Image (spheres, grey):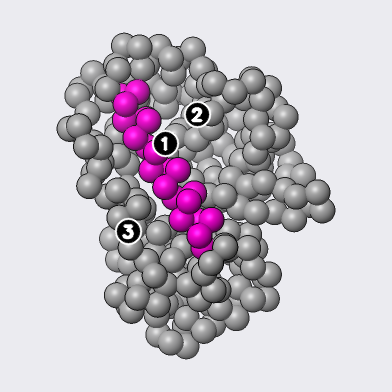
């Protein structure tokens, strides 16, 4: 089990601009009051090193949190201890919102890079959507997009071959990063090691390495350390059966 967080920062004033608003401005418009309310949830930053655990199964009274910097991986373990990664959560995303309605958690959330998050309580969240009902609707929309992503990930594991799985997931991450303002040069802004990729795709580390090599040989991607650049997006999308419409890039429809 990853080590528990051992160094927390004291509550601070928070970022000058809400990272949630900045990440979601392509999806939805926010009033100044809504932006201030979201920013208030970012006022208690905590630092986590790569591999440190934020949430574990069976934990009661865990809190939702905003990722201010870095990234967090969500995963489940089977009875043999094999890991299946469900999602990679990025800067500006709100994680573990389910804790506001569930008595205990059933998932691991671990910092996949050195990260900074700001946790808040269920009462603070309910107060937020009570005073700003449209924000509650936006949260429901985000959860619905997450459900569409999960369905696509199941299709990856159940029906797509290794090349398709890899290309599809890399393109999904790139589109999400671009929409959140985290990438503008076809390069994934979060480092991805072989173990993380393998756990995302349901492949062995060796198969994942061979698949990356194949995509490099076909001049579809380039790698530098753990960073990946998409070289030919159109060809990779065709090879991977990738259509970004399930990410609903047009945004929240009621704006």
Q: Secondary structure at mark 2?
A: helix
Q: Secondary structure at mark 1?
A: helix
Which numbered disc, 3 or 2, marks the residue closer to the eye? 3
Q: Residue at x 47, y 81 (%)?
A: 215
Image coords of residue 171 (percent x, y): 39, 64
Residue located beneath label 3 in the image = 244
* Contact (Cβ within 8 Å) of mark 3 with mark 1: no
> Which of pointers 3 and 1 lies earlier in the amino acid sequence?
1
Q: Is residue 140 visible?
A: yes
Which numbered disc, 1 or 2, marks the residue closer to the eye? 1
> Which of pointers 3 and 2 lies earlier in the amino acid sequence?
2
Image coords of residue 140 (percent x, y): 37, 30
**Front one among 125 and 255:** 255
Residue located beneath label 1 in the image = 143
Q: Is residue 4 left or right of residue 222?
A: right
In the image, residue 140 lies in the stretch drawn in magenta: yes
> Which of pointers 1 and 2 lies earlier in the amino acid sequence?
2
- The secondary structure that most of the magenta stretch takes on is helix
Mark 1–mark 2 Cα distance, whole angstroms, equals 9 Å
Vertical order, 15 against 130 (above or below):
below
Residue located beneath label 2 in the image = 97
Start and end of the magenta stretch? 135-156
Mark 3: give few (<14), some (14-19) or many (20+) Cα within 10 Å.
some
Mark 3–mark 1 Cα distance, whole angstroms, equals 17 Å
Q: Residue at x 82, y 53 (%)?
A: 80
């Amino acid at each position: 089990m990853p080590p528990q967080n051992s160094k927390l920062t004291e509550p601070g004033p928070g970022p000058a601009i809400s990272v949630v608003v900045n990440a979601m401005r392509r999806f939805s418009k926010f009033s100044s009051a809504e932006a201030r309310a979201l920013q208030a949830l970012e006022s208690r930053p905590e630092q986590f090193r790569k591999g440190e655990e934020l949430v574990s199964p069976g934990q009661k009274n865990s809190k939702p949190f905003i990722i201010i910097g870095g990234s967090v991986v969500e995963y489940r373990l089977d009875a043999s201890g094999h890991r299946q990664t469900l999602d990679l959560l990025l800067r500006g995303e709100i994680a573990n919102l389910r804790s506001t309605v569930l008595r205990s958690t059933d998932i691991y959330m671990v910092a996949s890079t050195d990260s900074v998050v700001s946790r808040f309580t269920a009462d603070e969240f309910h107060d937020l959507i009570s005073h700003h009902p449209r924000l509650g609707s936006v949260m429901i929309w985000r959860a619905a997009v997450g459900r569409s992503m999960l369905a696509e990930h199941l299709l990856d594991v159940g029906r797509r071959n290794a090349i398709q799985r890899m290309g599809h997931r890399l393109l999904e991450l790139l589109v999400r990063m671009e929409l959140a303002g985290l990438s503008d040069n076809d390069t994934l802004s979060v480092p991805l090691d072989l173990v993380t990729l393998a756990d995302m795709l349901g492949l062995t580390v060796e198969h994942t390495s061979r698949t990356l090599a194949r995509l490099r040989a076909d001049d579809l991607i380039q790698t530098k350390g753990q960073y990946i650049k998409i070289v030919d997006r159109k060809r990779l999308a065709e090879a991977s059966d990738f259509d970004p419409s399930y990410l609903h890039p047009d945004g929240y429809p009621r704006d």
